Amino acid sequence: MLRKSLLALLLVGLAGCATSTMYVNYTDQRFPAKDPSFVVNVYPQGQALAASTPYYVIGRVSIEGLASNGVTPETLTAQAMRIARKRGADAIINARTVAFRYYYGDALYRFNGDLIMYSPK
């Protein structure tokens, strides 16, 4: 029983490291990190923000991982939200997760999104 528990912990640990992340800054400015409890809104591609909500894009995040390593679209979105908090972003726009299916049953999930800061009014 202990052996199975240790194996399960190892697999969960590996799933946390089973992604590849790329972040591209669009500005030289650095922003203070948000509190870990800060809610980062994620707006899917095609959903426009209201015109009364001005913003500017500070960067782009791309994360990918294999389903066989425990990666799901939800885990990629959660990881993107953590990156957004770390970079000081208020929200993620143009968010999209694409699945590339392999003939042997596995899938590669790829999340892309733009990190934004709301402009002061």
Image: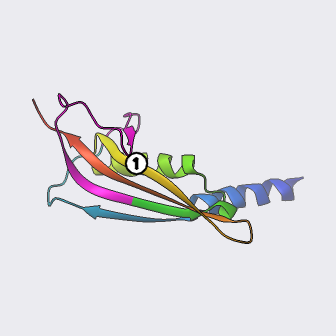
Furthest residue toward left: 121
Quadrant for the C terminus, please. top left
Asked whether residue 88 appears in the rendered view, the answer is no
- Residue displayed at 58% across by 58% down: 16
* Location of residue 41 in the rendering, given as x and y in whole percent from the top left corner: 37, 36
**Residue at the disc numbered 1:** 95
Q: Quick check: 84 left or right of 103? A: left
Q: Which is the main secondary structure of the residues drawn in magenta?
A: loop
Tell whether position 65 is magenta. no
Among the 4 quarters of the image, the one containing residue 18: bottom right
- Residue displayed at 90% across by 52% down: 1
Total residue callouts: 1
Among the 4 quarters of the image, the one containing residue 51: top left
Tell whether position 60 is magenta. yes
* 118 over 79 or under it: above or below: above
Among the 4 quarters of the image, the one containing residue 43: top left
**Element under label 1?**
strand
* Location of residue 71 in the rendering, given as x and y in whole percent from the top left corner: 61, 56
Q: Residues within 10 Å of mark 1 (few under 14, many from 20)?
A: many
* Location of residue 86 in the rendering, given as x and y in whole percent from the top left corner: 34, 50
In this view of the protein, which residue sits in the foreground, 65 or 103?
Answer: 103
Q: Quick check: 107 left or right of 56? A: right
* 108 over 33 or under it: above or below: below
Asked whether residue 87 appears in the rendered view, the answer is yes
- Amino acid type indicated by mark 1: Ala
Furthest residue toward bottom: 103
Q: Which residues are magenta?
A: 34-61
In this view of the protein, which residue sits in the foreground, 100 or 120?
Answer: 100
